[in-house]
Structure formats: structure tokens, C-alpha cells
Amino acid sequence: MSPVTGEFIQYQPASPTWAQALQLTLNQIVMEKKFLLNTEPFSVTQIEEYICKMIKNENPFWLAVQDRKVLGWCDVKRLENINLRHTGTLGMGVSLPFRRRGIGKNLTRACLAEAWSSGFDKIELTVYADNEAAISLYRSLGFIEEGRFRRFARIDKNYKDALRMALFKSPDVE
């Protein structure tokens, strides 16, 4: 798939060559302990293996890059159960200095376009209920709330609720 470019930021499918640059961005977000379920840093090897597995399984995985730095990512991982393979789980993140500039929306749009063309019918995600910026982004893209998980995670002895949101390829689902 060819890269999409805009405002000196390149949007492109992930490849293992970006693992080290992605590690810096991902671990910065991990260490914030506000947005991701995982609160332990990832190694370059773990990220390389994840990227390779996503590519092998033909799962959409996009990066926003600028000057050899990864500014953010978005991926959709197909569920493995045979009866759920029409569904993918979306994950994304944007580095702190680059938030609220449309990068997350552009990444998500690129990922969704690839997901729809790859046979996904439903994309779901879990977002912390206090992450208002992300919830607003997802709603602007058409995601709807499917439910709430009370005390979904406990980070540093504090509970966090989460919302389950979903987007359907066919508009006939309410």
C-alpha cells in the first residue's frame, strides 16, 4: 500500500525497520500511565515481533512519521476466534507533542480504510472513560458506545472505567 503524505508528516504502513523509532513513542505513552492498559515498557524485539505478526496476519498497521521519528500509530488486529474474524480491535497512540493536530484522525482513517478493504465488518476498541479527547475523536469518526466496564483497570492503586466503542462497515447497525 502506498504512503499518504500531508503537512510534512508521512502516513505509511508499518514495517519492522520502524521498530526502534516506534519503541520511543510507544514507551513514552506507556510511561504516562493514562491511556494504555500496558504500563511496562516494550523492547525493540517485542515491537519487531508484533509488527511482523501484524503483517503476516494481514492486519492494518499504520505509522505517522516525520524526520525518521514515529509520531503515532494505529493498528487493527483481527480477532482469532473463527466466529469473530469479521471483527478487529483498534489500538492507537500519538506522541504528546503531536496530539490534537489531526494525526490520530488521519492514522485512524488510513487504518479503517485498509480494514474495510480487507474484509473487516466491525472495528471495536476500549478507551478509558476519562480520555475525553480520544472519545471525541472516535465519535467524530462514527464510533458508537456499546458499553461501560466499571473498574476495568487498576493503575497505581487507582481504578479506571473504560468504554467499549464500535464502528460498523454497514451503516444499518445502530
Image (cartoon, helix red, strand yellow):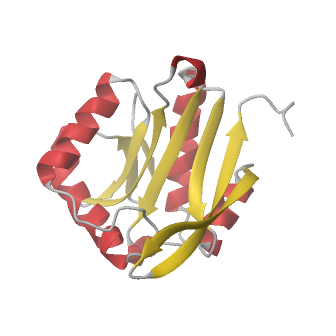
Is residue 15 in sight in this rendering? no
Q: In which quadrant of the rendered image does the C terminus lie?
A: top right
Q: In the depicted view, which residue is nearer to us: 169 or 153?
A: 153
Residue drawn 78% across the image and 28% down it: 170
Using residue 85 as the reference point, say whether residue 13 is left or right of it. Answer: left
Q: Nearer the viewer, residue 53 or 154?
A: 154
Q: Is residue 133 visible?
A: yes
Does residue 72 sit above or below 119 in this rendering? below
Residue in front for this viewpoint, 140 or 174: 174
Where residue 120 sits, quadrant-wise, is: top right
Residue projecting furthest to the bottom: 157
Give the residue drawn at x 49%, y 30%.
Answer: 79
Residue at horizontal 39 percent and vertical 75 percent from the top: 33
The N terminus: image quadrant: top left
* Residue 55 percent across, percent down from the top left: 31, 28
Number of numbered callouts drawn: 0
Residue 141 image point, x, y percent: 70, 51
Left or right: where 17 falls relative to 15: left
In the displayed structure, would residue 125 be above or below residue 35?
above
The residue lying at 72 percent from left, 49 percent from top is 143
Observer-nearest of 153 and 63: 153
Q: Quadrant of residue 67?
A: bottom left
Left or right? Give the position of 73 relative to 89: left
Q: Position of residue 118 (x, y in %)?
A: 53, 21
Residue 9: where, in percent of width, then height? 39, 57
